[in-house]
Image: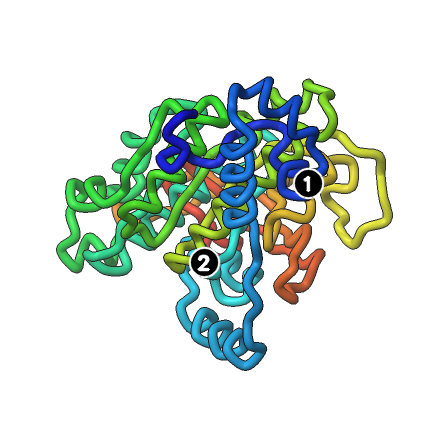
Amino acid sequence: MSNINQTKSPRVPEELKVLFGEVNVGKYCKRHSVTPEEFQTIRCQVIERNKVLPKNGLDMLNELKARDSRRLSIGYANIDELLGGGLQPGDITEISGESTTGKTRLCYSALLSITCLNKENTALFIDTKNGSCANYIRTLFLESDQFADARERGMDVDSISDRIHIQKGCVYEDDLLNVIEDLNLQFQQKLIVIDSISSVFSPLLGYNIDHYPYSRITIFIRTLRNLAKKYNITILITNSVQYARPYDHKSVFSINKKPALGQTWTYLTDTTLFLSLGDDSDQRVYINRQGCEILGVPRICEVLRSRKNLVVGRYCTFYMGYTEFFPEFAAI
């Protein structure tokens, strides 16, 4: 801590108390082996990191109009429609749902859709579950009808793979923060995907130390949001679910479950899509351009929450096979 100018703001539970001047300076200095002068420097760093600058209303309106014209496809037209035209650059979109509902598969679709848009686009996939994502992404590009046009335009799988950067090993909060903060130094990605946020932060919820886990989640999302706004990046995050008491909500699909990470998380994302399983007996078969029969299982995607004037409770039904998303009318 002696070279305070080269030290980042401390990742300690008291950060919010430091911000609002509610921490005991003497105890803090003793616990973290810093001098009162260094403490004041740390406090200034925390204030600088969390401050919100005023904006002119007309400038904000013009910025919003410009951003609306640059929406990015998630890879499936009906879900793009639910999102008001696609993923909004600068926003944080959450995909929540139980296991096997297709959250990760939808993220792969977004990654490939954005990198196939033109040969300059790149994306970052942060895999907190250390899965075998690279092979599946390659298979989707080579076999799915979604990307047939890109293949016909001469895009090859190696070029696509090179532009989708996969980061593994982020199993702890500090790992994730290090990756995100390092991106401030040099950043070119159009899309960041974090799959999944709950596997990193859910273990922290077992620590009942003041509001420690919730303050850490809030600080992380604030850091991520600042990055998204600064570089006009689209952020896509997957989340698991937790059981909830039935509540009065427009949704008819997910009233017994809700996104994980507690009540605080509710206010941190811009839009939450909730994926549910459909009726397994209603499976359909789709024949793709390569003549392969793809068995599709029904899924339901609904807008569960939104701060972007989207219609909460609106939903679409689609079928998901190993390499394809397809609507009911495309099945045989």
Q: Locate residue 169 relative to residue 279 in the image: left or right.
A: left
Residue that appears at 50% across and 27% down: 173
- Closer to the chain start, of discs 2 and 1, is 1
Q: Secondary structure at mark 1?
A: loop
Quadrant into which the N terminus falls? top left
Where 52 sits versus 28, above or below?
below
Q: Nearer the viewer, residue 280 or 210?
A: 210
Q: Secondary structure at mark 2?
A: helix
Question: Is disc 2 surrounded by few (<14), some (14 to 19) or many (20+) residues within 10 Å?
Answer: few
Q: Locate residue 160 relative to residue 288 in the image: left or right.
A: left
Where 85 sits versus 3, above or below?
below
Whether residue 54 is visible: yes
Residue that appears at 62% across and 45% down: 274
Question: Is disc 1 surrounded by few (<14), some (14 to 19) or many (20+) residues within 10 Å?
Answer: few
Where residue 199 appears, as percent x and y from the top left, is 54, 25
Whether residue 281 is visible: no
Where residue 195 appears, as percent x and y from the top left, is 46, 34
Residue that extends furthest to the bottom in the rendered view of this protein: 58
Residue 166 is tagged as none
Residue bearing mark 1: 21
Q: Which of labels 2 and 1 is toward the front?
A: 1
Q: Nearer the viewer, residue 253 or 84?
A: 84
Q: What colour-coding does the image apply?
A: rainbow
**Kind of residue at badge 1:** Gly
Where residue 260 appears, as percent x and y from the top left, is 66, 33
**Kind of residue at badge 2:** Lys
Q: Are marks 2 and 1 in contact (CB under 8 Å)?
A: no
Q: Nearer the viewer, residue 88 or 155?
A: 88
Residue 229 is tagged as 2
Where residue 219 appears, as percent x and y from the top left, is 57, 40
Q: Locate residue 328 relative to residue 157 in the image: left or right.
A: right
Q: Identify the image quadrant of residue 194.
A: top left
